Image: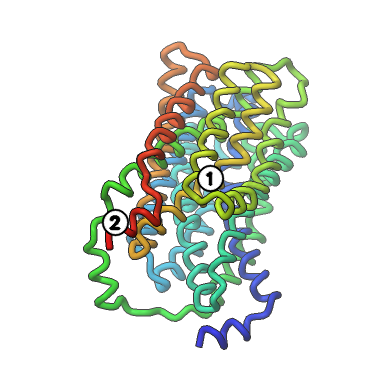
Amino acid sequence: MPNSRQSGTSPRELFAVLAAGAILLLVTHGLGRFIYTPLLPYLVDDGQITTGQGAAIATWNYLGYLLGALLAIRWHTIRHIRILLPTALAGHVLTTLVMANTDQLASMSAARLFNGIANGIVFVQAPALILEWLVLRNRSTMSGHLYIGVGLGLLLSSGLVSFSASWLEGTERWWPAFILSVPLAWWATARLLRLEVPVRAESKAGSATGKTPLLDRASVPLFLSYAGAGLGYILPMTFLPLLAKDQLPAGHWLLEGAWLVAAVVTLFSPWLWNILGAKIGDLPALRLNFVVQLAGVLAAVILPGAIGLVLCAALVGITFVGTVMLTQRIGRALHPHQGPRLSAAMVSLYGFTQMAGPWLTKQWLDAGGTLTTAFGIGVAALAFGLVFLFFVPGPGVWQSSQD
């Protein structure tokens, strides 16, 4: 049956499904979550919020992402996805509309909270639905192409903010994201809801599998490493343009260009780390990924100015999507019977540490620290994660020890 489905699936249909998934990640990540990063300096300059308030609003969004991921874990079946996915996309559109119409801090925080919930649901459920569809057609290796939507979303968000910067102000700056989100979310959601994915009951074998331990001496260091990655990358991905504003003179091209650099290189991240993982192994590639990402965040601290900002944007942009891909693959290789459960737990952990980043930054700024020195939090987090990676056993060695 899978072979017949594979032969009956045209390249055009495969492209349409993968494009729909990538667009949903583009909409929720690029036009929902990360467009806030290039917008933040303008919102501060407009007098709508302060830097500290901006960090607090970001924290609410990341809390929402964590809650959305947890909801997606709780309601994870195909039947649930068909209900929650369009609901989440509608939530993204409505909360973006709220941001375009309010300058009240409480309303903005609530809107970003619910936008994060929508983002978390979509980021878990859209790839899950598409992976199920691809598995039935023996095309599961193509699922990684979805994540190009993250890079395209960063690029699009940078372009929208820069293009509209001179003729929009305050809440008006959210209108381009709202206007573009509506048709993209509508088409992509409608396309995915048409996928033929049978609803299967859980087997007894599947239930028994869930009783095996999720945490052991192989997965615990991987979880701790992933926690460090989440906290380490989120600081530049939230505050990079604001850091450029603090470090550079008015009119410098990197005030907008730093986010553009990060967006462009992110497009190549899945491809690069997929190749390196195949050549040297996923675990060595992940260790290298952490070293490169750590160097990027450290550059912003020890080389304040144009050079440090470019290095930070380029090295973090080229690594953070690869971190997610490699960690998920290593986790599944260590515990092949725990795939969906392990993936869901990692998404939740990642969401929690991302939420902690802006909150810690706000505490640092309120205590009199600077945004530049706050990036030291990210340096410490990535160093923490890198250390624990050396306690993760190779999947082959670990499986042999369990036989």
Q: Position of residue 213 (x, y in %)?
A: 24, 56
Query: Circle 2 sits in a helix, a strand or a loop, which is it?
Result: helix
Q: Residue at x 53, y 52 (%)?
A: 92
Residue 359 can be seen, yes or no: yes
Front-most of 101 and 93? 93
Q: Residue at x 41, y 50 (%)?
A: 347
Q: Real-space Cα distance between discs 1 and 2?
A: 23 Å
In the rendered structure, the answer to whether residue 182 lies left or right of residue 253 reads left
Q: Position of residue 258 (x, y in %)?
A: 69, 30
Name the disc covering residue 401, or none. 2
Front-most of 177 and 63? 63
Query: Circle 1 sits in a helix, a strand or a loop, which is it?
Result: helix
Q: Residue furthest top?
A: 368
Q: Residue at x 73, y 15 (%)?
A: 249
Q: Position of residue 2 (x, y in %)?
A: 52, 83
Q: Which residue is mark 1?
A: 285
Mark 1 or 2: the one toward you:
2
Name the disc covering residue 235, or none. none
Amino acid type indicated by mark 1: Ala
In the rendered structure, the answer to whether residue 360 lies left or right of residue 99 reads left
Which of the image's four quarters has the C terminus?
Answer: bottom left
